[in-house]
Image (tube, rainbow, N blue to C red):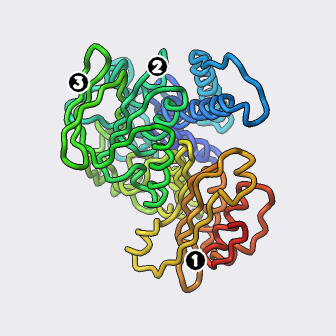
Amino acid sequence: MAKYDVAIIGSGPGGYVTAIRAGELGLKTVVIEKDAFLGGTCLHVGCIPTKVLLHHAEVYEHLKNAAEYGFEVSGLKVNWAGTLARKDKIVKKHAKGIEMLFKKNKVELVQGWGRYAGPGRVSVEKDGKESEIEAANIILATGSEARMLPGVEADGKTILTNREILQLAEIPKSMIVVGAGAVGVEFASIFHTFGTQVTILEALPRVVPVEDEEISAELDKAFRKKGIQIFTSSAVESVKKNAGGVSVTFKDKDGKSQTLEAEKILIAVGRRPLTENCGLEKSRAKVERGFVHAGPYMETEEKGLFAIGDIVAGLPQLAHAASAEGIVAVTHIAGKPVQPIVKTRIPGATYCEPQIGSIGLTEKQARDAGHAVKVGKFPFLGNSKATILGSHGGFIKIVSEESYGEVLGVHIIGPLATEILAEAATVLQLEGTVDDMMNMVHAHPTVWEAMGEAFASVRGLQINF
């Protein structure tokens, strides 16, 4: 039996990135994957296909407003089958790319259900047969799946999760989205643009509740202006299928019971870690509500057993977080120096329209942590490139420490927010200050230069607003 330095259970953006880095570091590596394809939820039914649809929605929106750009477009209609075909083509291309990278880096692949079987051992079940793999280190990268409301089950036709909604044969006339986190607002944005009447129900007091309060308020305003109906502080009481689709009863923020009907309902109330039947009961790893506790180098309390990605307690369920955690784990395993993950330096990107990009502490979090806070804001209304793009709503908000100007958080809503966030991630990683950033030369005309103005606004020195 072959003996490996590292065995990784799961091939999502945590697992496959970790495997490739392990190969680059010269570690004998094997990946155990339950599905017949590589890439996990993110590539097949999450990040990538969703962003394809968001991009298509953006193109469609531009074409609908072609006259503003000096173009005449007639007979415009959505070829939904074509859109889905391109989505699938992109997904398959990147799945094949992972296969090639595995071969290049000598990563072996075993298909089947992997479980921790004790120190240095992974059991693999496939077609009713079990085999065992020996590895000095084992990394759990099993990911997550959509949570459901109590008593509600997805049927793939009317009651949907992020999986089924990507395969709809037609664009629905109406849709209720339960949950206003990243998944909910992205799909709301997609289908509203394509002509669906969208209503959002959110149990918490605001949309995108993990974001800075001013960002939430701006997205709420932008969505309502588009015609998306939003109910916050609203708890779903029942979901029932009917002849026309679905009927949803909920209690609104005033405590009144209301009922809405739509063709489809998307349940987007978060994701639960996939840690059942993974053999964790045979380890000393601490598991809480399905989440696994891990140390600074992602090792659990069971020596040689590591956990990364959506199953890890206390870290965000983001693809890039999973990848970074895996790199930390496997670099540590290889005996090379590596910096542990710092939660406040993990960027968040939400690709609805308008886009949201954020990193670090919100204003409230910074004040609650005892910082003397100074805030600056710059609206995209003062940015010429944003006007050229026809997208000058939103703003950049800087949260800084008052005495020395250390940047504690950056929160963006508006054009290319998920791209210009790169500067914010850099300044937090390098523990830079407002003065460092406002004195850096930003190219003109770019959307990016609004970052320089935002940093300058902390000192009251912005130019274009």
> Quick one: SS at disc 1?
loop
Which residue corresponds to the image point at 56% horizontal and 65% vertical from the top-left? 397
> Quick one: SS at disc 3?
strand
Which residue corresponds to the image point at 65% horizontal and 51% vertical from the top-left? 392
Q: Nearer the viewer, mark 1 or mark 3?
A: 3
Three-letter residue code for mark 2: Leu
State the CA–CA distance, disc 1 to disc 3. 51 Å
Label placed on residue 41:
none
Say which residue label 1 marks. Answer: 406
* Residue situated in front as seen by the camera: 436 or 399: 399
Which residue corresponds to the image point at 62% horizontal and 60% vertical from the top-left? 379
State the CA–CA distance, disc 2 to disc 3. 20 Å
Three-letter residue code for mark 1: Glu
Q: Position of residue 253 (x, y in %)?
A: 25, 49
Say which residue label 3 marks. Answer: 240
> Quick one: SS at disc 2?
loop
The answer to which of marks 1 and 3 sits earlier in the sequence is: 3
Say which residue label 2 marks. Answer: 168
- How many other residues sit within 10 Å of disc 3, few (<14), some (14-19) or many (≥20)? few
Q: Position of residue 385 (x, y in %)?
A: 75, 52
Do labels 1 and 3 touch, CB within 8 Å? no
Please determine whether, in this image, residue 279 is positioned above or below residue 86.
below
* Direction from residue 148 to residue 104 in the image, left or right: right
State which quadrant residue 130 falls in: top left
Do labels 2 and 3 touch, CB within 8 Å? no
